[in-house]
Image (cartoon, rainbow, N blue to C red):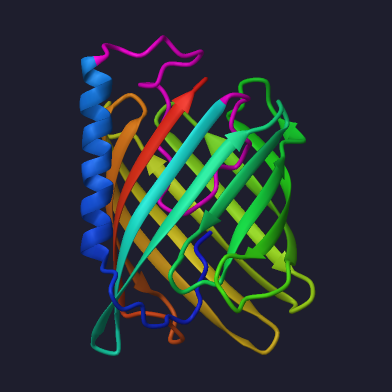
């Protein structure tokens, strides 16, 4: 899911600086990991696991002791001007059936960060398909923001030999509004993974806003991936005319 909120101005911080920091960090991490030798063999091969999409949640909780962190620099064109932001999304498994997601898709312009609990109540033995109810709490992370908002919803997943489809829907009963996304990640090779996502929101008295995102992820080594994507609006109501995304993804622990 990718929150579609109006942008504000965020002077002094540019997407290029965030991107540079992200790339420096991930390359240093990769170099250090290379110097330390190959990582311990995970429970499931890192080469077998597909990377995450750019914004969409995984449809089932991560395994216990597994962690995933996505950090992205965003550059959006709005009314002929460029505006910048960054996003982060941390996923971890708390128990065999419960996962925790902490994220903010527009940290500089979104006053609240989300903590979402995911309950994998329905899944097959292999974990390749399933359904998970969710409950989400949005708590203030900017000065001036107050109160905690609660939302509910569900996620689903369907995985095959070389693809992964994930979907999430969030519903805010107080505003009678919903938002969500769906993603498809495909294995082109052991290191190259095309990604497509549909993202949107709408509700009573609100315009329906939708975007489509197409991108490519490159696996540098097991657990370390970088990605580039481009998003455009599908609806007349829109938050931007185009958006570029540069993302780094780290996965560690029991994979």
Task: Please name the residue shown 46% across and 65% down the image.
Answer: 107
Residue 114 position (above or below residue 216): below
Location of residue 97 (image quadrant): top right
Q: Position of residue 193 (x, y in %)?
A: 30, 39
Secondary structure mostly seen in magenta is: loop
Q: Position of residue 95 (x, y in %)?
A: 71, 28
Task: Please name the residue shown 54% across and 46% down the image.
Answer: 166
114 left or right of 55 in image: right
Location of residue 205 (image quadrant): bottom right
Does the segment drawn in magenta span residue 44? yes
139 left or right of 214 in image: right
What segment is highlighted magenta in the picture?
Answer: 36-65
Does the segment drawn in magenta span residue 165? no
Q: Is residue 191 visible?
A: no
Q: Position of residue 210 (x, y in %)?
A: 47, 73
Outermost residue, front side? 143
Task: Please name the residue shown 21% across and 43% down the image.
Answer: 24
Q: Position of residue 2 (x, y in %)?
A: 49, 63
Task: Please name the residue shown 64% across and 59% down the image.
Answer: 169
Q: Is residue 93 visible?
A: yes
User: Which of 199 and 106 lies nearest the eye of the viewer?
Assistant: 106
Residue 137 position (above or below residue 176): above
User: Which of 18 and 175 lies nearest the eye of the viewer?
Assistant: 18
215 left or right of 178 in image: left
């Amino acid at each position: 899911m990718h929150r579609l909120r109006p942008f504000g101005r965020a002077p002094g911080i540019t997407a290029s600086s965030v991107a540079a920091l992200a790339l420096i960090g991930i390359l240093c991490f990769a170099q250090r990991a290379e110097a330390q030798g190959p990582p311990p063999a995970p429970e499931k091969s890192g080469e077998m696991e597909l990377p995450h999409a750019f914004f969409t949640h995984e449809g089932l909780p991560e395994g216990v002791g597994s962690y995933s962190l996505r950090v992205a620099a965003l550059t959006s064109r709005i009314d002929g001007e460029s505006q910048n932001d960054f996003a982060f999304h941390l996923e971890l498994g708390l128990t065999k059936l419960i996962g925790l997601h902490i994220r903010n898709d527009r940290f500089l312009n979104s006053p609240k960060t989300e903590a979402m609990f995911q309950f994998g109540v329905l899944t097959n033995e292999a974990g390749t398909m399933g359904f998970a109810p969710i409950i989400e709490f949005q708590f203030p992370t900017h000065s001036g923001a107050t109160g905690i908002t609660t939302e509910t919803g569900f996620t689903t997943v369907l995985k095959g030999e070389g693809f992964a489809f994930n979907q999430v829907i969030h519903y805010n009963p107080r505003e009678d509004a919903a938002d969500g996304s769906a993603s498809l990640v495909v294995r082109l090779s052991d290191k190259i993974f095309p990604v497509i996502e549909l993202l949107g929101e709408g509700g009573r008295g609100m315009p329906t806003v939708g975007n489509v995102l197409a991108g490519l992820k490159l696996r540098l080594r097991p657990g370390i991936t970088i990605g580039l994507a481009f998003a455009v609006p599908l609806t007349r109501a829109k938050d931007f005319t185009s958006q570029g995304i540069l993302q780094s993804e780290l996965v560690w622990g029991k994979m």
